[in-house]
Amino acid sequence: MIIEFCGVPGGGKSTAVAAYLSAHPEALLITVDMRRRLPEAWYALIFTLRHPVSFISLVAFVARHHMSGLGAYSLHLALRACAKYGKASCYSTKTELVIDEGLVHAAMTLSAKPLSSNEVSALLSRLILPSRAVVASEGSFHRFHGPRDVVHPRALAGDEALQTWESAVRANVTVVSRHLPAFGVKVEGVARVVR
């Protein structure tokens, strides 16, 4: 079973993951190290071979909806999400697997504009989805507004583009969360999991 933690940046996903893992020691966190490109590429390839429709659909989604100037960055985030699911597929289905920011998160956060209900439904119908999604529906986006000595790629796009993206993410988290149950995904809030 896969449980994905997803949603608004700065919404407590990492804290919720830590709390969940502490309360469920049998669960396994699936991570992909950004500094080690070869394993990341290997697991993304495994995902692509096992789920070509999901892979192509996500790449096409990024190509259509990424924030201007951030195509390569958005594609990298999509590939990381694929790699996490590819790595998860290498484990027993009896193991409870936890993914922080996977495919559902990509659907929520990679678009630079609010998605229509039809767009979300079409994308979700093609993605490999978790059994449960723990959704942070509120967040501060603090990592994008931090000190200027560590500037995030999204912040480099400028304040107006960043505000547009933040608004889109908030809208997309809502619409994606609403559609997930129709695809058999149990949706819970972060606060409920941390308790």
Image (cartoon, grey):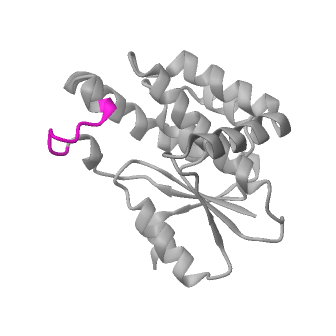
Q: Position of residue 186 (x, y in %)?
A: 67, 59
Q: Is residue 92 left or right of residue 110?
A: right
Looking at the image, is 169 positioned above or below residue 156? below
Please tell me whether the stretch drawn in magenta is mainly helix, strand or loop: loop
Q: Position of residue 91 (x, y in %)?
A: 79, 62
Of residue 170 and residue 33, the one placed in the foreground of this image is 33
Looking at the image, is 137 positioned above or below residue 157? below
Report the span colored magenta: 146-154
Q: Toward which corner of the image does residue 42 lie, by quadrant?
A: top right
Q: Position of residue 95 (x, y in %)?
A: 77, 71
Is 123 magenta? The answer is no
Q: Position of residue 77 (x, y in %)?
A: 52, 36
Q: Is residue 50 left or right of residue 191?
A: right
Q: Is residue 131 left or right of residue 76?
A: right
Residue 179: in sight, yes or no? no
Is 149 magenta? The answer is yes
Where is the N terminus found, in terms of image quarters? bottom right
Residue displayed at 68% across by 30% down: 123
Looking at the image, is 46 positioned above or below residue 126? below
Q: Toward which corner of the image does residue 113 lie, by quadrant?
A: top left
Residue displayed at 80% across by 56% down: 90
